[in-house]
Amino acid sequence: MHKEGIHKKRGSKDYKTSWNFTLLYKSDNDPQIERDMEEIERTCVTFEKKYSKKDFISTPSKLLAALKDYDGLEAIVNAAKPWWYFALRTDSNSDDTKLAARSTHYEQRLTAATNRIQFFSLKIAAIPQSKHRALVNNPVLKAYKYSLERAFRGAKHCLSEGEEQLSSLLDQTSHTMWVDGGQKLLNERTILWKGKPIPVAQGIALLADQSMKDRQILNTKINETLKAASDYSEIEINAVVNHKKVLDERRKFSKPYSSTVLSYQNDDATVENVVATVSKRFDISHRFYKLHAKLLGVKKTTTADRAAKIGSIKRKFTFPEAVALVRDSFESIDPRYAAVLDQFVANGQIDAYPKKGKRGGAYCWGAGKEHTFVLLNHVDDITSTETLAHEMGHAIHTELSNKQPARYRHYSTATAEVASTFFECIAGELIEQNLSERERVVFLHNKILGDVMTIFRQIACFNFELELHERIRKEGQLSKEVMAQLLSKHLRSYLGDAVTVTDDDGYFFAYWSHIRNFFYVYTYAFGQIVSRALFEKWKADKSYAKKIEQFLNAGGSMTPEDIFASIGINVRDPKFFLAGLKGIEKDLDRLEKTAKKVWK
Ligand SMILES: [Zn+2]
């Protein structure tokens, strides 16, 4: 825990370590908050009045005028400033329940306002398919080409306006509340650990730091707790997967992952390519776990050890030191990226330290032309420093994407993780140079472990989800025992022979929140492999920084496939992902060689 306040930065400029909310509003009682909310509501009502009963699709020029109007509306509505002001306030101080209540209040008004304009995209989606090609290629609509392509791509899967509204309203009771219920149930369960009851999440977080024997005991307790809670999870998973099945059939999605892939603007073929390529190279993660066991001094490990640390790194990075290091690494690509970081710390756009009532983890939140905010929980270690670089990667991506018109500012999650992990990788390189050789073994091990978790574990998770959905679709329901067996099978597939996986390990399905956000895990693997390619290209030729900027500027103006193709990366080519995985093999070679020298 740190005391908040002002730190002196190198170069003596003062900077802030907690959020400066006055960048948004003067105070919680600023009358501008209500005025902004009313403007959003008014804009939506005006738009609805103007267009809901009017023909705006029969000619390209009518469509152009309407799209322009909609652009202006999006710029106001998407910023959603009153709501996210209170959402940020809540995240920094959840003890004040009044803040959470006001956040919900504005969120509900925002939903009500945007429901009024849903008709617009539905009407465009309803334009007959025979007219799509002519409209997309019409020079009058050139600036909106990709918007239209996206709308038409999604059109095949749209339901009627009434059905769409019903489905979004019922999502709360048929998915969200089921998942929340499971979460609540698990949050209330405790594990008796060293004489004290601790929550399941804390038990899982503690695993990596225990002795091997204690890890085993703790893991067994976690499994027992999850198994005992799995009666609920069984019904929950059957319910949410079947709910999705009903919708997918109505929406004419052919595969369980197709709707997710479409929402991230990817192609099914690209995702199938990543999944197949990574699955074919599970031998890389097997090799890692063999080496992992060796570095731990044993022949075989268990799932309890899968993220175990092999040693510690003494080198600490206080927040000012972390900022200085990350700044230097960003400067090596382009001084303008370092300037963004300078501006963030000077303005108070980063909330740096953990504190009571503050939300855990880390994120970057930005929308439209407003200031972007980064939340951290910096604890002076290397991971915290990498997290700063990661979240600032998102922040830079967000700031540069803001150059796009409103319709293209929002980027796909599939490109988001490329930006963040690229900047993280650049900072990681500089961190490594600050370490002793023995510490470097630990660092490199942690880095590869991170890659294995981001790429191989997430793809094994994808494979598990796919089999789960396919079998529930075919068989109606699955028992919790079968769900656990399935997960154990897929855990074995990427962990390999060096790791013993029991059937009880599969009860982790009751806890794994990823599988409740269907199939999105592929974006992690995709992002990590593509960012590695960017890094290698930049290492080989520093002028590639221009192409990286081009990608960061692109926002959501093209599909991720096209954005990367425009900078010389063909994610449609199966060989591309194969080459990306070779980079991890190279790291493994390096780890093996260094460990031989300095590890006992
Ligand atoms: Zn991220």
Image (tube, helix red, strand yellow):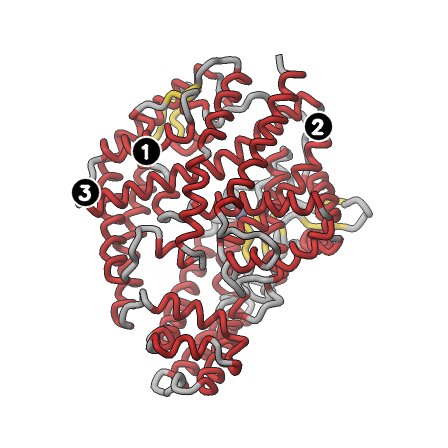
| Most foreground residue, 422 or 275 | 275
Q: Residue at x 72, y 44 (%)?
A: 329
Q: Residues within 10 Å of mark 2 (few under 14, many from 20)?
A: some
Residue that badge 2 annotates: 435
Which kind of residue does numbered mark 1 sit on?
Leu
Residue 352 in sight: no
- Residue 265 in the image: x percent, y percent? 45, 59
Instruction: Give the residue number, with chain letter if any, for mark 1.
Output: 487
- Of marks 2 and 1, the one in the foreground: 1
Q: Which mark is residue 80?
A: none
Distance of label 2 from label 3 (alpha carbons): 52 Å
The CA span between labels 3 and 1 is 16 Å
Counting residues from the start of the chain, the first of labels 2 and 1 encountered is 2
Crowding at mark 3 (Cα within 10 Å: few <14, some 14-19, many 20+):
some
* Tag 2 near tag 3, CB within 8 Å: no
Circle 2: residue type: Leu
- Quick check: 472 above or below 298? below
Q: Residues within 10 Å of mark 1 (few under 14, many from 20)?
A: many
Q: Amino acid at mark 3?
A: Gln
Q: Residue at x 52, y 13 (%)?
A: 297
- Tell me the quarter of the picture where residue 385 sits: top right
Q: Measuring from the top left, give residue 382's x and y in whole percent.
A: 63, 34
State the quadrant of the N terminus. top right
Q: Is mark 2 within 8 Å of ligand 1?
A: no
Residue behind mark 3 = 477
Sooner in the amino-acid sequence: mark 2 or mark 3:
2
* Real-space CA distance between mark 2 and mark 1, rounded to the nearest whole angstrom: 38 Å
Q: Is residue 147 left or right of residue 428?
A: left
Q: Is residue 443 left or right of residue 7?
A: left
Residue that appears at 50% across and 18% down: 293
126 shown above or below 213: below
Residue 149 appears at what percent x and percent y?
Answer: 44, 69
